[in-house]
Image (cartoon, rainbow, N blue to C red):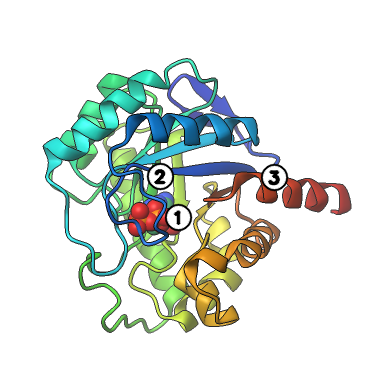
Amino acid sequence: MPNFVCGRFELDLTQPRIMAIINVTDDSFSGDGLRGNLDGALNKAERALAEGADILDLGAESTRPGSDPVPEQQEIDRLVPLIEALQGCGVPLSVDTLKPSVMRAALAAGADLINDVNGFRAEGAVEAVAAGTAGLCVMHMQGEPRTMQQAPQYANVVDEVGAFLVRRTEVLLRAGVRRERVLLDPGFGFGKSTEHNLALVRGLGALRDLGYPLLVGLSRKSLLGAITGKPVEARGPASVAAALMAVQYGAAIVRVHDVAPTRDALAVWQAMS
Ligand SMILES: Nc1nc2ncc(COP(=O)(O)OP(=O)(O)O)nc2c(=O)[nH]1
């Protein structure tokens, strides 16, 4: 598998990688948002790096079910100082946004990866990222965060998610994006029922066969609450187990809140595989 190209970095994905979630939001579902608190976010980033994070994913707009959009200038004002402060941190800086103007501001500030939960569907999103070498995570979402969990429907969720990801990626490639810059993500919890999410976990191998590295985000999500009955703050062990299963099924990168336990679990997985 060729290295994943993301900005100033090339990531070797022959071993599973950890993307640490750094939310500077008001209302993230996991309650970990740092409300635009730059020092808090920097401390969290430093801890994630010390614990072995391979990528930092910076987000300033919650995309939890039922969430409302954040004004783009507020998103930019929260993200740009953080991106600038983390220059030179030694790992790729990912920015979790679906707004083209925020993508442009993030890239100008030095972001290495754009993580778009909307699959670069917004008007101008493809144009905002096509040039350059930033990594691009194409994620599937059915509907929009505000309403996506009301009644998600699929005839075959793995086939439909896969077809969407291929369509969006082909748009990027036609715009001149090199395939080594692309990650795919099925978007757990983004317009999916528990059954849909479980089918997608078991279907990760089929999505991996599309020919691009997979990014998977299951950490603390409602799927784990449905399985364990635990509230979001008690889903750490389930999140580690889910990350292991995702890697076992073919994920190249896991997006997590808790880096240290995930790092240990992946070390055990690698030693025993
Ligand atoms: N690529 C990708 N990006 C994502 N961004 C946000 C969330 C939601 O999780 P979180 O950031 O913890 O919550 P919130 O969006 O409420 O801040 N999940 C994903 C995901 O599964 N994949």
- Density class for disc 3 (Cα within 10 Å; few <14, some 14-19, many ≥20) is some
Residue at the spot 43% in from the left edge and 76% down from the top edge: 157
Q: Which of marks 1 and 2 is nearer the N terminus?
A: 2
At mark 1, the secondary structure is: strand
Q: In which quarter of the image is residue 38?
A: top left
Residue at the spot 48% in from the left edge and 31% down from the top edge: 43
The residue type indicated by label 3 comes to Arg
The residue type indicated by label 2 comes to Cys
Q: Name the residue under label 1.
A: 185
Q: Distance between the residues labelled 3 and 2?
A: 22 Å
Instruction: Answer above or below: position of 157 versus 161.
Output: below
Q: Quadrant of ligand 1?
A: bottom left
Q: Is residue 127 in sight in this rendering? A: no
Q: Residue 263 carries which label?
A: 3
| Disc 2: residue Cβ within 8 A of ligand 1's nearest atom | yes
Residue 78 point in image, percent of width and height? 25, 34
Q: Distance between the residues labelled 1 and 2?
A: 7 Å
Between 225 and 119, the one lying in front of the other is 225
The residue type indicated by label 1 comes to Asp
- Density class for disc 2 (Cα within 10 Å; few <14, some 14-19, many ≥20) is many
Tag 1 near tag 2, CB within 8 Å = yes
Q: Name the residue under label 2.
A: 137
